[in-house]
C-alpha cells in the first residue's frame, strides 16, 4: 500500500464513486482517520456495494438473533443478543478498536517517508516480464466467462492457502508465536478482533499474500494479458470485498454461529472460536482464514464450538498481563524474544 496506489485514475471514476486518493492527498489527517476503513473497503467507495454490505450486515445480525433469540422478542433483546455492551465495551474490545488504526497508520507513515512495501502488482509484473523470453502462449482465456470465474476462484484459494500456511508458522515457531500472542490475548471476540495483531504479523501476512498471488497473476498475465482486465471489469474488487466482509464479520464473533453443511468449506464463528479457546484440546487447531478445508486436509482441525460453558478465551495469566494494553501488546513480543534468547543461551551454558 505505497503511494503508487494513491494515483488518480479518471477512467475509473463514475457517478457512484468517491475518489478518496484525491481527498487524502490534501488532508493527511483524513487518511489517518479513515485508513482502517479504506484498508477494508479499498481506495474507492462505490455506494452500491456499501449499500449491499449494510444489507448483508443487517441480514447476518437478524439471522444470529433468530438462532440465539431469548424468550422475549424486543429491540433490547436483539441488541443484547447480537451486539451486547458487555462484549463491545469490554477492555479487550477497546484494545481492538485502537489496533484498528495502528496498521494503516503505520503504512501511511512509511509511504510518506518513501518506504514502499512490495506488492502483488510489482511481483506479478516482474514474473510476467521474466516469462516474455519464452514467447507467448496464445491462449485468450478472457474470452470465456466460466474460465474467468475459475481464474478468480483459484486466485482466492491460493491467497487463502498462503494465510493458512503462515498462520501455522505463527504457532509452531516460538519467535513468531511471541508476536501472534497479541491476537490471541483477546478475552472476547468481535468482528474487530481480526485487526488485533502485531504489525510484524501484518507485514508477514502481506508479503506471503503478495508473493503467492503475485506469482499466480504474473503467470496469468503472460498467458493472456487481458484476463486480469476481464476480472477487474467484473468489478472483482467489489466481489472480493464482499468475501472479506463476510469473513471479517463472521470469523470472530462472541456467539458460536455455525454454517451447517457450508462449514465444510467456509470458516464459521464456531469453527474459528475453537482456535481461540485457552485449553490444550484446542491448541494449534483450526487455522483456516476463509476456507476451512485446509485444516481437514492437513489434519489440524477440531470440532467447532457448540457451548462455551467452562471454557475461556485468551492466553495464560502471565501472558495476559503482558498483553493487556495497546502499548504492552506492541512491546511484549520483543521482550518475549529477549527471554527466549536468554533461555537458549542459559541452556547452552
Image: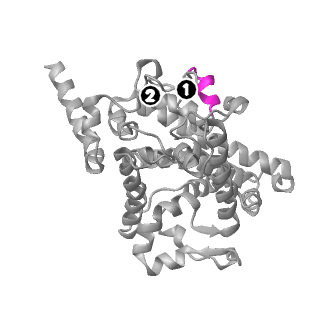
Q: Are the residues tagged 1 and 2 within 8 Å (C-beta)?
A: yes
Task: Give the residue at mark 2.
Answer: 277
- Tell me the element at label 1: loop
Q: Residue furthest right?
A: 144
Which numbered marker is on residue 88? none
Q: In the rendered image, is residue 57 in sight?
A: yes
Q: Residue at x 61, y 39 (%)?
A: 69
Query: Of all residues shown, which one is farthest toward the bottom?
Result: 26
**What is the crowding at mark 1: few (fewer than 14 residues within 10 Å), some, or many (at least 20)?**
many
Q: In this image, 214 relative to 226: left or right? A: left
Magenta segment boundaries in residue numbering: 292-299
Residue 157 located left or right of residue 99: right
Residue assigned mark 1? 305
Residue pictured at 57% horizontal, 30% vertical: 271
Identify the residue at image location x=52%, y=31%: 287
Is 82 within the magenta?
no
Q: CA distance from mark 1 to mark 2?
A: 9 Å
Q: How is the image coloured?
A: one colour
Q: What x and y, as percent, mark residue 15?
A: 71, 78
Q: In which quadrant will I find the C terminus?
A: top left
Of 120 and 172, nearer the camera is: 172
Return the x and y of residue 106 as percentages of the image width and height.
Answer: 37, 60
Amino acid at each position: 500500500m505505497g503511494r503508487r496506489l494513491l494515483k488518480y485514475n479518471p477512467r475509473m471514476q463514475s457517478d457512484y464513486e468517491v475518489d478518496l486518493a484525491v481527498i487524502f492527498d490534501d488532508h493527511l489527517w483524513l487518511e489517518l482517520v479513515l485508513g482502517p476503513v479504506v484498508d477494508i473497503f479499498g481506495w474507492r467507495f462505490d455506494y452500491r456495494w456499501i449499500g449491499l454490505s449494510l444489507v448483508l450486515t443487517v441480514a447476518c445480525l437478524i439471522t444470529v438473533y433468530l438462532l440465539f433469540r431469548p424468550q422475549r422478542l424486543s429491540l433490547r433483546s436483539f441488541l443484547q443478543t447480537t451486539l451486547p455492551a458487555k462484549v463491545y465495551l469490554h477492555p479487550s474490545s477497546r484494545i481492538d478498536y485502537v489496533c484498528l488504526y495502528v496498521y494503516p497508520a503505520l503504512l501511511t507513515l512509511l509511504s510518506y517517508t518513501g518506504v514502499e512495501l512490495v506488492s502483488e502488482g510489482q511481483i506479478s509484473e516482474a514474473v510476467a516480464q521474466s516469462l516474455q523470453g519464452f514467447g507467448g502462449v496464445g491462449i485468450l482465456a478472457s474470452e470465456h466467462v466460466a474460465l474467468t470465474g475459475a481464474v478468480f476462484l483459484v486466485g482466492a484459494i491460493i491467497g487463502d492457502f498462503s494465510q493458512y500456511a503462515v498462520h501455522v508458522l505463527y504457532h509452531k515457531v516460538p519467535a513468531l508465536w511471541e508476536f501472534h500472542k497479541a491476537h490471541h490475548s483477546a478475552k472476547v471476540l468481535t468482528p474487530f478482533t481480526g485487526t488485533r495483531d502485531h504489525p510484524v504479523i501484518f507485514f508477514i501476512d502481506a508479503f506471503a499474500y503478495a508473493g503467492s498471488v503475485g506469482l499466480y497473476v504474473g503467470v496469468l498475465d503472460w498467458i493472456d494479458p487481458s484476463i486480469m482486465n476481464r476480472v477487474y471489469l467484473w468489478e472483482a474488487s467489489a466481489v472480493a470485498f464482499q468475501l472479506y466482509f463476510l469473513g471479517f464479520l463472521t470469523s470472530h464473533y462472541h456467539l458460536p454461529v455455525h454454517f451447517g453443511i457450508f462449514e465444510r468449506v467456509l470458516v464459521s464463528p464456531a469453527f474459528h472460536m475453537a482456535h481461540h479457546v485457552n485449553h490444550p484440546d484446542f491448541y494449534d487447531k483450526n487455522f483456516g482464514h476463509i476456507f476451512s478445508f485446509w485444516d481437514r486436509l492437513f489434519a489440524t482441525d477440531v470440532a467447532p464450538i457448540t457451548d462455551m460453558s467452562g471454557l475461556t478465551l485468551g492466553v495464560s495469566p502471565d501472558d495476559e498481563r503482558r498483553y493487556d494494553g495497546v502499548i504492552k501488546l506492541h512491546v511484549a513480543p520483543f521482550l518475549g524474544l529477549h527471554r527466549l534468547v536468554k533461555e537458549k543461551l542459559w541452556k547452552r551454558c
